[in-house]
């Protein structure tokens, strides 16, 4: 029993020490993390930031990515969350049906949960029309682009907890109606992607990406 405890203690001690050893004397070269993120810098010491607590907070954020096997542990944690708990560790990313990924605000917008009101949208269009007219007087042109939304492109994979079956007025619907009567220059890529959905030879949106594809 004592021998088991001794070996267990040594094993746990090694688990604690190995990341520090890897950090100081790297004996593996893990692949870097991909994606969009910002690496915080280790701050310079000052007594004012020390006593305010800012130094400790910023130092921890700057030190964390340099810890041994940090990238591998991040990958492992993300994979466990996704494979076992159907949870995406990326910020604001939702795992939908059939493992389709969404950014949550696209779902919110597509379902009309962020609807403002028609008067507010009309006021914004009037301001944009004023800008377009002023630019045209100076020989320049303004073109409004309505970007495609993955949630409107793949509504069939939106999780049931968002109640996609409930139809509401959306900012997009009102915007399209008002733009059609505004004489504004615009292109509606959202409706265009929907028209191409069944005939496109390649995916305009991939299920595992939150943005439109390179082809799209």
Image: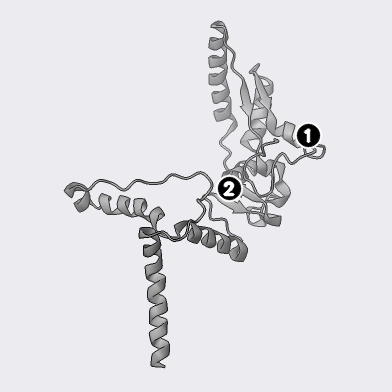
Q: Outermost residue toward the bottom?
A: 1
Residue 54 or residue 110, whichever sits in front: 54
From the viewer's perspective, is 51 left or right of 22?
left
Q: Name the image colouring.
A: one colour
Residue picked out by circle 1: 195
Q: Quadrant of residue 81?
A: bottom right
Where is residue 132 drawn, in percent x and y?
Answer: 57, 15
Where is residue 82 drawn, in percent x and y?
Answer: 59, 60
Q: Outermost residue toward the left?
A: 47
Residue in the image at 38% along x and 81% along y:
9
From the viewer's perspective, is 184 left or right of 26?
right
Q: CA distance from mark 2 to mark 1?
A: 23 Å
Q: Is residue 168 visible?
A: no
Q: Secondary structure at mark 1?
A: helix
Residue 87 or residue 43, whichever sits in front: 43
In the rendered image, the quadrant that contains the N terminus is: bottom left
Where is residue 150 drawn, in percent x and y?
Answer: 66, 42
Where is residue 88 drawn, in percent x and y?
Answer: 57, 56
Marks 2 & 1, CB-CB < 8 Å contact? no
Residue in the image at 57% along x and 17% along y:
129
Residue 66 or residue 211, whichever sits in front: 66
From the viewer's perspective, is 168 left or right of 73?
right
Report crowding for label 1: few under 14, some 14 to 19, many 20 or more residues within 10 A (C-alpha).
few
Against 202, residue 99 (above or below) is: below
Residue in the image at 50% along x and 59% along y:
72
Q: Give the mark nearest the N terminus, 2 or 1.
A: 2
Q: Is residue 74 visible?
A: yes
Against 19, residue 206 (above or below) is: above
Residue picked out by circle 2: 104
In the rendered image, the quadrant that contains the C terminus is: top right
Residue 147 or residue 34, whichever sits in front: 34
Report crowding for label 2: few under 14, some 14 to 19, many 20 or more residues within 10 A (C-alpha).
some
């Amino acid at each position: 029993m004592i021998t088991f405890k001794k070996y267990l203690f040594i094993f746990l001690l090694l688990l604690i020490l190995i990341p520090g050893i890897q950090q100081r004397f790297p004996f593996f070269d893990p692949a870097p993390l991909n994606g969009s993120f910002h690496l915080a810098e280790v701050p310079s010491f000052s007594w004012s930031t020390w006593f305010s607590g800012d130094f400790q907070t910023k130092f921890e954020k700057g030190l964390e990515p340099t810890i041994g096997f940090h990238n591998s542990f991040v990958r492992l944690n993300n994979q466990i969350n996704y494979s076992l708990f159907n949870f995406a560790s990326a910020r604001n990313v939702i795992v939908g049906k059939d493992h389709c990924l969404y950014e949550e605000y696209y779902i919110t917008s597509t379902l009309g949960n962020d609807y403002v009101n028609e008067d507010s949208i009309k006021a914004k269009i009037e301001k944009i029309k004023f800008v377009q007219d002023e630019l045209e007087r100076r020989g320049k042109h303004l073109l409004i682009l309505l970007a495609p939304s993955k949630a409107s492109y793949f509504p069939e994979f939106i999780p049931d907890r968002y109640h996609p079956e409930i139809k509401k007025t959306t900012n997009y619907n009102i915007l399209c109606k008002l733009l059609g009567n505004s004489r504004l220059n615009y292109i509606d890529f959202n409706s265009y992607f929907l028209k191409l959905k069944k005939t496109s030879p390649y995916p305009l949106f991939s299920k595992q990406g939150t943005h439109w594809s390179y082809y799209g």
